[in-house]
Image (tube, rainbow, N blue to C red):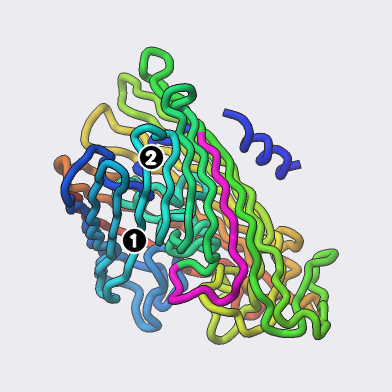
């Protein structure tokens, strides 16, 4: 039933109050522009060495850290028929390429835009929304798991009929599927489709609405003769010599909604997104921490694959306080990598489940202060919860809450 609802949303009226990563700083003709932002932060974890989706795992003997979360430098140029975007991320971990794409457009046919290179996968809302403008420190766990680092290499066509339906934006992309890896590890390509509708300035320009839907159709190559399928709350083995080199389905279906109300107390926004599907993962192991067992692969997975049915969602609520510089933040997100089994049955003998099947929920709350038009301070706490399982290391809730204080400068 949920899939039919999501497919329905794909064909009905998305809006975004979005700062789109898949675009130059402006489409006005200009010479080279340099923009960017720097996020420096201090974090305190509930215990040392935790696995965390709030800026990465903590070191084994550390429960606190200073770090550069993001150090983005973006260079772009827009000409009459083309534009180019190049962005890097420089932190204490080194320098990484984030965006490198060329866009083609024609003034006489400006409803279409062709993008080629390294860009954000056009799935849903939060993936393409810039971290420099997002109020919350991180994207929801489900999207960090399904699409780590958000980008992929490929080509994309965007349709935006500005004259007859300016509220509509449609994207269709073909990508490697391996994200920001050095090279694609098989010849198969993944397809991403996104349909967005934007209705702005309703009710005397005080109310804004956006919604849309997305589909991701891809595969993951099996490197062994065995993979695990879910049946009746447990994993059963599928073993055959034909499984070596077989491509197993990787499918996501997503829907999203954004609301904004400009009221006398201050701007109120509510954003939510839901995604479900099938994710080929691996088992928990000494080298792969539980939550990462269902993460998408940048390189060929060498061990047996686990086909998991998953779902995840988030709710984001922000409230400007008395039209001041302060904004209150409240968030809740859930990621269940295996919807076919309850936590109490994970780890029981014979069902082949592991820590990679555990469900997590996160309650986040905090405050931002815009010190000026470029400088923003954020204080934010994340309370992460998991139910107990039959696994020895996961019999109760992990002590993995994280408190973050962040200072951001954007230029």
Q: Residue furthest top?
A: 204
Task: Mark 2 or mark 1: name the one nearer the start of the chain.
Answer: 2
Quarter of the rendering containing residue 343: bottom right
Circle 1: element type: strand
Classify 72 as above or below 199: below
Q: Residue 251 carries which label?
A: none
Q: What stretch is highlighted in magenta?
A: 180-196
- Dot 2 surroundings within 10 Å: few (below 14), some, or many (20 or more)? some
**What residue lies at 57% left-to-right and 52% top-to-bottom?**
192
Residue 159 position, x and y percent, is: 48, 38
Classify 394 as above or below 409: below
- Dot 1 surroundings within 10 Å: few (below 14), some, or many (20 or more)? some
Q: Is residue 261 visible?
A: yes
Residue 262 position, x and y percent, is: 35, 23
Q: Residue furthest front?
A: 108
* Residue in front for this viewpoint, 261 or 394: 261
Q: Quadrant of the N terminus?
A: top right
**What residue lies at 52% left-to-right and 69% top-to-bottom?**
178
**What residue lies at 42% left-to-right and 43% top-to-bottom?**
113
Q: Is residue 191 magenta?
A: yes
Classify 278 as above or below 307: above
Residue 109 position, x and y percent, is: 41, 34
Q: How far apart are the two marked residues, 2 and 1, measured between alpha carbons?
A: 20 Å
Indicate which label's residue lies in the foreground, 2 or 1.
1
Residue 9 position, x and y percent, is: 63, 35
- Tell me the residue that label 1 is attached to: 100
Q: Is residue 143 magenta?
A: no
Q: Can residue 388 be seen in this view?
A: no
- Tell me the residue that label 2 is attached to: 18
**What residue lies at 53% left-to-right and 66% top-to-bottom?**
176
Circle 2: element type: loop
């Amino acid at each position: 039933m949920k899939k039919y609802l999501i497919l329905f949303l794909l064909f009905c009226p998305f809006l975004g109050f979005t700062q789109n990563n898949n675009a130059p700083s402006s489409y006005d003709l200009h010479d080279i522009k340099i923009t960017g932002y720097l996020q420096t932060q201090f974090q305190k974890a509930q215990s040392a060495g935790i696995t965390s989706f709030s800026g990465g795992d903590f070191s084994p003997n550390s429960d606190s850290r200073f770090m550069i979360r993001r150090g983005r430098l973006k260079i772009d140029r827009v000409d009459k028929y083309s534009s180019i975007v190049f962005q890097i991320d420089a932190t204490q971990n080194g320098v990484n390429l984030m965006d490198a794409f060329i866009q083609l457009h024609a003034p006489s046919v400006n409803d279409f835009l062709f993008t080629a290179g390294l860009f954000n996968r056009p799935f849903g809302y939060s993936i393409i929304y810039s971290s420099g403008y997002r109020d919350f420190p991180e994207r929801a766990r489900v999207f960090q798991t399904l699409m780590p680092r958000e980008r992929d290499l490929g080509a994309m066509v965007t349709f935006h009929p500005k004259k007859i339906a300016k509220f509509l934006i449609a994207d269709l992309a073909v990508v490697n599927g391996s994200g920001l890896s050095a090279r694609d590890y098989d010849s198969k390509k993944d397809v991403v489709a996104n349909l967005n509708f934007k209705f702005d300035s309703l009710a005397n320009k005080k109310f804004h609405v956006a919604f849309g839907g997305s589909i991701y159709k891809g595969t993951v190559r099996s490197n062994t003769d065995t993979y695990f399928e879910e049946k009746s709350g447990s994993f059963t083995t599928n073993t055959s010599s034909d499984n070596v080199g077989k491509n197993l389905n990787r499918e996501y279906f997503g829907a999203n909604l954004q609301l904004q109300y400009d009221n006398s107390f201050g701007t109120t926004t509510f954003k939510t997104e839901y995604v479900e599907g099938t994710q080929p993962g691996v088992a928990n192991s000494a080298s792969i921490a539980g939550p990462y067992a269902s993460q998408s692969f940048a390189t060929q997975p060498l061990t047996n694959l686990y086909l998991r049915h998953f779902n995840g969602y988030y709710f984001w609520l922000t409230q400007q306080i008395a039209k001041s510089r302060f904004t209150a933040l409240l968030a809740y997100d859930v990621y269940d990598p295996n919807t076919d089994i309850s936590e109490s049955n994970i780890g029981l003998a014979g069902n082949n489940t592991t820590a990679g099947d555990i469900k997590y929920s996160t309650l986040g709350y905090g405050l931002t202060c815009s010190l000026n038009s470029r400088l923003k301070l954020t204080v934010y706490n994340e309370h992460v919860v998991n139910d107990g399982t039959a696994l020895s290391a996961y019999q109760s809730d992990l002590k993995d809450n994280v408190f973050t204080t962040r200072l951001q400068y954007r230029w």
